[in-house]
Amino acid sequence: AANVAHRSEVEALADEAVRETGGIDIWVNVAGVIVSRPIFEVEEDDVERLLAVNLKGAYWGCAAAGRVMRTAGAGSIINMSSGGGESAVPGLSIYSRTKAGLNMLTRSVAKEFGPLGIRANAIAPGWVDTPMGLHSFRDETGTVSQARHDEAVRSRAQASPLGIAGTPRDIALAVLYLA
């Protein structure tokens, strides 16, 4: 366990992985948080938290993994982005900002680490049915409305060319492919 907002904890995580396995072949920056609020209601703490976890955490992860991978001359770094990093969604301004930054970080890492034999990619799914997305279906008491959730899954599936809504397994298979 590590708080990715703190560089020292991410570096300790990488050091532990090296001690336990002898190296790092694959590193996935998947930690993320979301705030869903109109821009004029966002608090400073919201901005700081999302930047710390979604952007700084991935930055420190890329750096820690890259330091280890460059010795081996190979590796794969995968950043979990979002379709929100490419298109604006009302209420998700800070989240989208961090994911857009993560997309550029991924491009920068690919250019900088590529000559060292290290690949860098981002996965940027649209809506996926995960606990993180449940914020959209909570009422004022914090309870998830199952009916609203089920309707969202149905409408997302209807809008998809394949007629399905994204699942965590879909993302896991993309990570596996890139790894």
Image: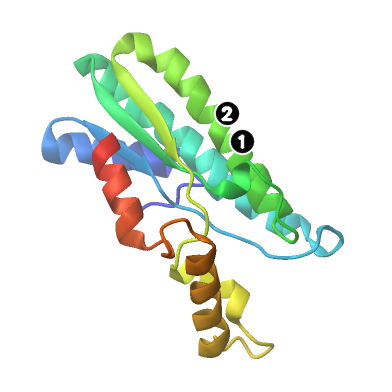
Which residue is farthest left? 21
Here the colouring is rainbow
Q: Residue at 75% of width from left, 65% of height from top?
A: 37
Q: Position of residue 170 (x, y in %)?
A: 33, 55
Q: Does residue 93 sit above or below 18 in this rendering?
A: below
Seen from the viewer's position, the closer of residues 12 and 132 is: 132
Q: Does residue 67 sit above or below 22 in this rendering?
A: above
Q: Position of residue 14 (x, y in %)?
A: 29, 37
Q: Residue at 41% of width from left, 36% of height from top?
A: 61
Asked which secondary structure carries label 2, the reply is helix
Q: Does residue 123 sit above or below 103 in this rendering?
A: below
Q: Is residue 139 left or right of residue 54?
A: right
Marking on residue 15: none
Q: Quadrant of residue 67?
A: top left
Q: CA distance from mark 2 to mark 1?
A: 5 Å
Q: Residue at 55% of width from left, 58% of height from top?
A: 33
Q: Are marks 2 and 1 in contact (CB under 8 Å)?
A: yes
Q: What kind of residue is marked 2?
A: Met
Can you identify the residue that label 2 sits on? Answer: 104
Can you identify the residue that label 1 sits on? Answer: 101
Q: Is residue 120 left or right of residue 143?
A: left
Q: Residue at 40% of width from left, 31% of height from top?
A: 121
Q: Position of residue 21 (x, y in %)?
A: 12, 37
Asked which secondary structure carries label 1, the reply is helix
Q: Position of residue 132 (x, y in %)?
A: 50, 66
